[in-house]
Structures are given as structure tokens and as C-alpha cells.
Image (tube, rainbow, N blue to C red):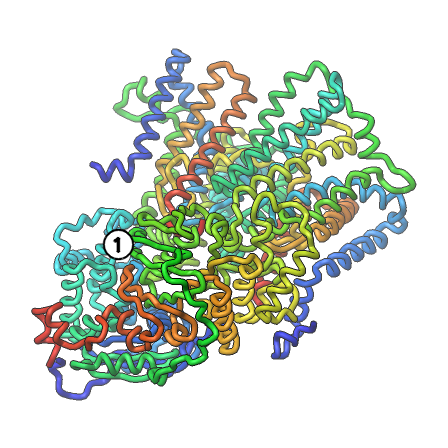
Amino acid sequence: MTTNPLPQSPLLDATGVAKNYGAVAALRNASLSVLPGEVHALMGANGAGKSTLVKILTGALKADAGRILIRGQQLDVRSPAAARRAGLLPVYQEPALIPDLDVLSNLRLTGTPVEPFRAWVRELGIPDLDIRETARHIPLAILRVLDLARALAVEPDVLLLDEMTAALPANLAEKVLEVVRRQGDAGRSVIFISHRFVEISALCDRATVLRDGSTVGVVDIEPGVEERIVEMMLGTRIEKTRVAARATNDVAVAAGSRPRLSVRNLQLGTKLNDVSFDLANGEVVGVFALEGQGQDELFAALAGSIRPTGGTIDVDGAPVKFSHPSDAIQAGIAYVPGDRAEALAMQRSVRENIALPFSAALRKWGPIRMRREQVVVSSAIARLQIDTRAQGEVQRLSGGNQQKVTIARWIAANARTILCFDPTRGIDVGTKQEIYKLLRELAGQGKSVLFYTSEMEEVQRVCDRVIVIFGGRVVDTFPVEQADEPALMRAAYGLPRGAKADVGILADVKPGSSAEATP
Amino acid sequence: MSRFLRNQGWVAGLFALLIFLFVVTKLIQPGYGSGDFGSLARAVLPYAFAVAAQTVVVIAGGIDLSVAAMMALTSVTAASMMNGASEEYALFVVPFVLAMGFVLGALNGVLIVVTRVPDIVVTLAMLFVLQGVALLVLEAPGGAAAEWLKASVIGTVPIPGLPDWADAWVPKALVLLVVCLCIVWIPLRRSRLGLSIYAIGSNELAAFRSGVPVARTRIVAYALSGLFAALGGLSLTVSTGIGAPIPGPYLLASVAAVVLGGVALGGGKGGLLGPIIAVFVLRLVRTDLTLLAIDPNVTAIIEGLIMVAVVMFGAFITMRSRPAGATP
Amino acid sequence: MTDSATMPQPVSFGRRIKRFMADRPLIPLIILLIILVVILQVLRPGIVNERWLANTAKFAIPLAILAGCQTMTMLTGGIDLSVGTVATMSAFIMATQIVNQDPTVAFLLAMLPAVLIGLVNGIGVGVFRVHPLIMTLGTSLIGTGFLQVYQRTVIASGAKIPDFLNWLGTGVTYGFPNALLLFVPVAVLIVFMLNRTGFGRLLYAVGDNERAARLSGVRYWQVITALYILSSLLAGITGLLYIGLIKAPSLSLAEPLVLPSVAAAVIGGTSIFGGRGGYTGTIIGALILTVLTTLLTILQMPEGGRRILFGFIVLFVTAAYLRIVEDR
């Protein structure tokens, strides 16, 4: 694709980049090398470290280790402003336009020239932009395009696009892709982060794949490369980890019995679209999705945190409307959020945290029967084997023990249905195993669990069925036997079951551009 | 036009309310004339500066509880410096006090940025401190103001070419207010700095990503707040002729006028015009109540009720405008 | 139960100190209190005697109860600045109504405004989500207005301090101030409520992590409304005690106690961000402040200096607390 046959020195060259958050390593050893005039894809499964790397490159975060060269010069990119000066410009998923300023003021704030901006806006397929309009009143999709135009207008050497086409209508997305490709032709580079193979095949020259915070490979984009990339993202885990030890479960879900939870045509703004599924008593249903596909909203709606805009939720066959989490709790539905900081009163004791739901109702505000509480809490602690040697504050427990406390609360409260949102994120292997076992036990006792996970192997370890969500819709439902990792990954990326993604598919999507995409 | 209404509709409505109140005043008291308007403008002066001080920080997404205490301190400082001093000495006092307000305001900002203690706590602590310093400067109301300063808020500004009857409606206090606010606000409003203040209040993350120096901008916002508060303190000294170390009711009044003026307590929205008009509205309500021969203490209650209602309404609006699913 | 059980790596001395401070905030407080008393004894040999102790306790008790209001509200991340006005109102109404009313009726009348102000505070903070500081400041202004109006209606009938309150406020029996008869049950009740009742648990939970509390089914507005009513009631009772101590009903009777009550709670280790603290620390904080005030009076520190000191204490303690929490 590049016209220059000589080997080029990279425009941006990052090596050995590492970043730790406390004891958790977000990036271990990431490298990324982008040639002039190249559209370079940055890929990786959830939590592989893509967004951390982008933040470091654009000065929003400081790396703990590593070297970043721009045009061969080592640069210390300390702030977004410094990154701008160095010619690196990001366009994030969340538009960086100030919502309460009009477009013109936003341009002035960043020192963006107006005329080139207007030209790019027209180029990107928005002919009638009112530059005096306040950003808050502009639809999100347009706003993202404006953010892109604002970046293009200062002619950056390296443009970082984070999921640029997500949530864009097809016509705008097409224009965006066209413009991005032309950036490459003009000798400027683009780093393109996307979950969509279709776009990457059509657009990119090379791809860098991250896994667990390290760069695991750089590949040229050519027909059929998708399978290799999926392999790289999965790593050695590709071999079948069929879980044999599943005989314990199988309280046979009585056929034809009423489902515990029945969701029909659930709608929530643009985030959830027509989601329907059932959750039976004694069943663990997995939810698998890439980040931001609407799973957060699905769980929040079921937990009573936000009200859906359409559709119905039935519990034990009776329709319910939750206006507050206490309504859901009343119906026996408990929500364990993925972020422990969201679920725990960190400065309070394990006991108080576990017993918190007991005091919630107005009539439970009186004196606590301490001894009885002690018994209930102790049995929950024992059941989850929480290490409570560090008495006192929950924040002094390890992450795994904290997570156990969030679950123990609902064991103690005897909730019939538990919504677990990625409960094993960032905790040690031993605790993970215990949580898997616990969830299976709960199912064995006739309780039901809805289990979102970002780790595919967990699906097979824990779930009876798995539903895959992509773009706010349920795109596929697998019984656990069929839910091997390649199948899940493909479904999660919106690729059809069984068929191998290749240029043939792309040709349908982007008729005009496939010739350019394949050299 | 529709955009004007959406962006400025609140201010326009407020202005209409103000006109309506003037009409009501004229109906209650047919003799209401230019002289009364002049005293209204004088009464508004310290409130207006207090509100300006609050507006700047609220737009930047913060709050300044030390506004009233800052006014008390600058007022007593000016009054005690001018006490027994020559008329010319006041020429030095005014810039000194303004600089003091600016620096103390900046100190607020620096403490917030450096200690990372929330703005509401830092400015509460500063409220204690500034009050204490004010008491050290002057234990009881006292001091003096230079005559030419006192004269600067009394009477009207003769404008050539304007008939006397119209001239009478241009009190010096109003002109002073408009000039002072314009000198600071108009260059700021369209500058990169002014935009940055709006930006950090509107969406701090987006501002950071747009390359706005967030910490520095926040400090400047508090410094400007201190400057406006110092203007308010000076206007107190000038209009009363003395300085009082106990802060007046300017804190709650400033917050109420900010909210009534269409500046969201969350930050990023609104301008200076709305809150200033809101101050006039609130003062005029007081005038009307007085004209209706209502007990001044009852007037205080009604005023307080209006303010609390406005603040509650503002909080309610902020709560409603939050996107669905956000933290309750 | 050592730290090393959960934290295998060696813990530095500084961190140990911090952790110790976080775990046992009472010990350094008691040490500080003793140091202050020793300084006092050194400066004025012989001042520390039985009478002085009883006197200190008498003045510390009203402060400690009001600081209890601050403790409870601060546990939820709030603050109640209306306690001064509420206490004053109750005291004033009691002193004036007792003249020609049955004591019970007078008592009920005195408690009525407390309940109303607490209710309005609670609704404003819990339902409308106004910042507690602004909300309580507003209701306190309104309350003061009402009090002024009320004063003029009872000006003819005069006021008297009921004998019982006089006895309770100033009396000493066997060397113990009678006020302890009120204070001990109140303190025990508050401590019991915070530690052993569902409501107390919710105060901590809501202040520590409102979202977590919500996900556990807690309805914020219920907790907050009940809390502010309770806080106001306590403030009203303090007012009755305080009038027995001061014996001169005025319209600013309890106002000087407001800032110290906040400072006492902060010094006592209650976090102004909520979720951490307790009443025992607050009681010691109130004692420290009372002794400190005596000390400052002996040193002839003016009122202004005291306020500055309070301001810095609040800021310093909050910032230090933030560091302790962050370093974990």
C-alpha cells in the first residue's frame, strides 16, 4: 500500500511499555511500532491493555517503564497537551468536546483552525453543521465525527482512533473509514482500535495484538488473517478446556416449569435492543460480550438501578417493575457489581458489610440482635471461606476476599437469584476456583445465577448456557457444550456462527473499497 | 432564534421578571423614581460582586463558601487602612485590597489542588480563617472610607447628550458595577482561559483530554472569585463608610442568585448576566415587600424562603439532567 | 491479628503510625487533652481543681451534644449548620412561653420548630439533594427570621429561665455538674444507636458508599430525613440546657457554638467525607476545644485568632485524614 519501497524508520515506536495499578499489572511489556503512512490496528481481548496503552501514548497516563520514540526522538509525553504538540492526537470513544460549549468555542479551546475543520466536516458527510451549536445538543454520533474532524484539522502525524465507528450509522461510518484510509495515503499514520474485523481487513495495513498486557504479535493484514488474530488474542487457551467435573450440578431443570426470570424485548435507549432470554431455577446462564455492548445496562435494569425504556421482566411468571434496587431485592434478585468499590462500604467491617441488607428496610432500623446477626454472618463467612484475620475495614482485605464479601452478603440474605457481573476480575486463581464452585453449588440448591464474564474459559467452568450480546442485541445463545472459545469469540465479534470471515464478506459490506484493501 | 431562546431564554425570562417587578413597584408606590433606583443600585452593589465571585467558581465546577468572609476581610482591611489616612492614600488602598482578594482567592485554589481536599471543605476552613483575620484587623465595626470613594457610588453619571430626566436613571453605582464586571468578564469570556474555566466545569475529563491545564485553570477561577469578592468588600466599605468584621448574608444570597441566574451548580453552564439580573430581582422583591409595609423581619423570612426554594429547585434540575443510570 | 497476617511485606514505621492513628484515634486525642491540661496547670499553677473540672464539663456538655449532631450528619457525608439557630429558637421559645404556659406545653412548643427545621433539612438534602451545607445554612437564616418576628410578639410578656433548666445547666451535686444527668443518657443513646441499631449502621453505610447502600436496598431519603430530624431535636434539647447555663435569652445564644461543634467532630476523628468516626472521639474533641478555649483566654488570644485556629484545624485534620486513607 505504501508507495515508498525503501525500509522506513517508524514514526512512532514504543517498546517495553509497562504500567501497574497497585499490585495489578495493566501493561507488562507492550510495544507498538507505526510506520509513516500506515493504518495500524491495535487489537486485543477485553483487559488486554489496549486502552491503557492508548492513554500512555497520549499523555493521559504515565508509564512505569518503557521507551517511546517519535520520529526517532525520545519524548516524555506528560500531558495531553504535550502529546498534541508532539503530533499525537487521540479520538476517544467518549467524545472530548466540552458539552456546554458550542463547537466554535471547542475549536478555540484546543487551538484548532476553523476552516480546515469545516472542510473535514463536509468531507466526513455532514454538510450542514451549525458551528454555533452547543455540543450537548448534538447527537452523539455526529459529535464523534466532529471530534475526528477536529483532530484531522490540525494534521497530526499520528492519529489514534478508539472504536471510532462504534455507534455510528452506516453512512457516516463509511465516510469515516474512507477518510482514515486517505490519511495513510497522505503519509500520516493512524492507530486504529476496533473490535470489528470487517473494518480492520478493509482498512489496515498491519495489526499489533496485545494479550495480558504484552504484545504477542504483529501481523500483516491479508485475507484469512482473522483466524490467526483470534488465536493470538486467545493465546494457548485455544485448546479445548472441556470441564469434566460438572457432574455435580444438573438438578434437572424441569421441562416446562416456570422460569425464575423471564426477560422479553428489553429496550434501554440505544444501549439495549430487544433483549429476550429466560433464567430457570437451578441454572447458571452466562452472558458473554465485548466491553460496552450493553451488558452493564442489562444488569443494571435487572437490578432495579435503571428503568428500561421498553420490554418486560417477569419474576416467577409475574410481571415486575423495579424503581429502586430494594424492589429487586424484595423479589429475591441481588446484584453483585463487577467493581468491588461499588458494592462495599470500604471503611466498614466485614460483618457490617455482609449484614447491610438486613437493616435497609424502615422497620429494621431498631436495635440489632447482635447474636443472631453474628450467627448468620459467621455461617456466610465460613461458607465462602473469607479470610477475616484482618478484622476491621474491608479495604484491608485482598481483592479476592473483598469479592467474596460482596457475594457473602447475598448468601446471608438468602437471595434466590444472583446477578454476578464479572465477579472474578482481578482476583487470584484460587479464589476464582472457589467462586466457580460456589456458583455451581448455588445452582445445585435451586438458586439461579446470571453470570457476566469477560473471560471465556469461565463460561465453560460455570455456565449451563451462554448468551452472547453484541451491539445491545442477543446475537447468539449456546448450550455450554458448544460454547468453545473460538465460537464465543466469533459470536462476540458479531461474526456469524461457523462461517469463516474473509474478504468475501467484506466485499458485500464495502463494495467500493475491497480492491484497495487487498494489494 | 430558537437557539437564542434555548441558550438565553432563562436570562431573557429573568429580565422580563425584573421589568414586571419594576412595574409592580411603580404600581405599589407611584412615586418610585430615579432616586429610589439609585439606592437600589447601591444596595445591589455588594450582592452583585458576591454573586460574580460565586459565579466564576460555580462555572468552573466548584463552590466558594468563603465569599462572604472574604468580603468582610477586604472590607475591614480597606476601612482600617483608610481610617485617618489622606484622600490620596486610598489610591493605594484600592489596588492593594484587590490584590489581596486575588491572592487569597488563589490560595483557596492552591489548597484545593494541592491538598486534594474537596472545595467545599477547603473553602469552609478558609471561611473560619478569613473571618478570624477580619476580627483581628477590626474587632468591631469601624474605620473609614475616603470621601472621593464614597462619592463614587452616590449620585448619577452625567452623560452628555442625554436629557436630565434620563440621566437621573443612570446611577453611578450601576455604572461602577457594569464597568468593573465588564473589565474582567468580557476579555475573559471569549479567551482561551475563560473557555477553559467553562471546560473544567462542564466535563473535567474531556477538558483534560483537550489539553486544558485543569489545576492551573481551577486556581485562576478561585483567584478571580477572590478578586470579585474584594470588589464586593470595597463596595461595602464605600457605601457604608465603615468596615464590619462579621460577614453579611452574602454567601447564601450568592448561591441563590447563581442558581436563579441560570448557572447550574454542577458547573459549565450560564454566564454572569443572569446571576446579576437575579440579584436585582431578589433585591427588588425586598423593596416591594418593604413598600407593602411588611415587617422587615417577615421580609427576611420571605427572602430566606425564596432563596432556599431556588436552591432546592436548582438541585432538583441538576438531578434531573443527569443521564439515566448515573449514580443516584 | 498483626498487620503481617494480611500484608506480608514489611510495613514502614510511618505507615504503622498512620495505621495506628486510623485504628485507635482516641489514644492520641486523650494524650493531646492531657498535654493541654498540663500546659494550663503550668501556666496557672493550681487552676486545675475540682471546681475547674466541673466548670469545664458544664461548658463542654452543650458543645459535645451539638458536636453529636455534626458527628451523625458527617457520618453520612453531610453537615448541619442549623443547629445553632435551632438551639437558640428552642431556648428562646421555652424562656418566653414558660411565663404563661404549662411547662409541658412550653416544652412541646419549643421542640416544634426543631422538628420542622429538621424535616425541611432532611427533605432538602435527602430528596432534592441540595448540598447539606447550603441547605442547613438556608434554614438557619429562615429560622433566625422567624425568631426575630416571634421576639416582637412576646416582647411585652418578658422571659424567665425555668428553675429546672437553671438547676440542670448550672447546678453541681457532689462535685458533679447536674448536666451530666442529661448528657450521660444522651451520649449512651447516641453511641448505642451508632453501633447497635440498624439506623446507625445505615448512617455509616450511606456515608461510606451511597451506591453500595442503594444496591443493598437502602432508600437514601428515608435515612437522611430521619437523621436531620434527629439532629435538630438534639440541637433543640441542647438549647434548653444551654439557656440554663447562660441564663440570658438572646437571638444569637447558641450561634458561637456552631463552628466549634464542627471542629470538635473533626478533631474527634469523624471524617467529613462520611463513613468513619464515632461519638466517643467527638466527646473528647469537645473537651479538647473547651480546654483550648480556656488556654487561649489565659493567653489572651483574641476571638479572631481562635477562629483562624479552628479553620486550620479543620483543614489540617481533613488533609491528614485523606493521606491516611490513601496510603493504605
Residue A193 seen:
yes
Report the label total: 1
Residue at the spot x=59%, y=29% of the render? C143
Callout 1: helix, strand or loop?
helix
Amino acid carrying mark 1 in the image: Leu
- Give the quarter of the image for residue C101: top right
Which residue occupies 56% across, 29% down? Answer: C142
* Residue A474 horizontal/vertical position (percent): 29, 62
Task: Tell which residue pokes out farthest to the top in this image.
Answer: B30
Front residue of this view, candidates B128 and C323? C323
Q: Report whether A292 appears left or right of B89.
A: left
* Residue neighbourhood size for the residue with mark 1, other residues' Cα within 10 Å, grouped as few (<14), some (14–19), many (≥20): some
Up-down relation of residue C292 to residue C150 (above or below): below
Q: Residue furthest right?
A: C174
Depth check: give the residue in front, B301 or C223: C223
* Residue B82 visible within the image: no
Residue C81 relative to residue A49: left or right: right
**Which chain letter goes with mark 1?**
A
Residue A11 higher or lower than C287, as above or below: below
Instruction: Classify residue A207 as left or right of residue B155.
Output: left
User: What residue sits right under mark 1 in the picture?
Assistant: A140
Residue B322, percent across and down?
Answer: 38, 47
Can you tell which quarter of the image residue C16 is in? bottom right
Q: Residue C249 at what x, y percent from top left? A: 72, 27
Please name whichever residue, B200 or A407, is drawn nearer the observer in this view of the structure.
A407
Q: Residue at x 42, y 27 (%)?
A: B41
